[in-house]
Amino acid sequence: MRVLPTTLISGMLLLGAGCGVEEVDVLVTVDVVGPVPTSTYHWIEVDSSFQRSYAFGDTLHYTMKAGTHTFHFYMVGPNCSVDPAGPVPVALRAEDSPVLVKFVYTCAATAPEVSE
């Protein structure tokens, strides 16, 4: 499996060159840094239209046509961030299958409230 750094491949496009549509297996994962978020589900959106819920620890599997597709992680909690942010274009080539798209979800610890 080849891991493609999403920030380095934006803007690349591969056009199918021959006998039919090439398909690519894509695995989407999210690494959590810091406290595990209390929200159970978040969303991964593909190509600005197709959304799937994501539970931390899961790996989502897609079979997609070769070419450039966008992936976006939604539902970022308070005191948290996701890298890469925003819709991320990823060039998919059949010879790289399976392709790993990885997000890093980072949350800062919050101090407990003290009541007097």
Image (tube, rainbow, N blue to C red):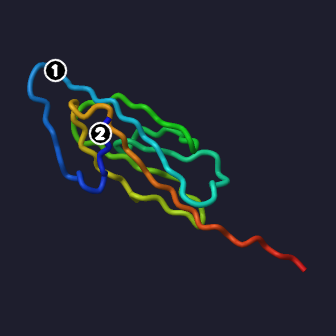
Residue 98 picture quarter = top left
Observer-nearest residue: 26 or 3? Answer: 3
Give the amino acid type for the residue marked by disc 2 in the picture: Arg
Relative to 91, 16 lies left or right? left
Label 2 environment density (alpha carbons within 10 Å; few <14, some 14–19, many ≥20): few
For numbered disc 1, what is the local secondary structure? Answer: loop
- Reading the image, the residue beneath label 2 is 2
- Identity of the residue drawn at 50% across and 62% down: 81
- Identity of the residue drawn at 43% across and 31% down: 61
Label 1 environment density (alpha carbons within 10 Å; few <14, some 14–19, many ≥20): few
Relative to 36, 46 lies left or right? left
- Identity of the residue drawn at 11% across and 19% down: 19
Residue 70 spot, x, y in % from top left: 32, 46
Q: Quadrant of the N terminus?
A: top left
Q: Quadrant of the C terminus?
A: bottom right
For numbered disc 2, what is the local secondary structure? Answer: strand
- Residue extending farthest to the top is 19
- Identity of the residue drawn at 57% across and 45% down: 56
Q: Nearer the viewer, mark 1 or mark 2?
A: 2
Relative to 65, 31 lies left or right? right
Give the amino acid type for the residue marked by disc 1 in the picture: Gly
Residue 77 spot, x, y in % from top left: 58, 59
- Return the mark for residue 20: 1
- 87 relative to 95, above or below: below
- Residue extending farthest to the bottom is 116
Residue 66 spot, x, y in % from top left: 23, 33
| Disc 1 from disc 2: Cα separation | 23 Å
- 89 relative to 100, above or below: below
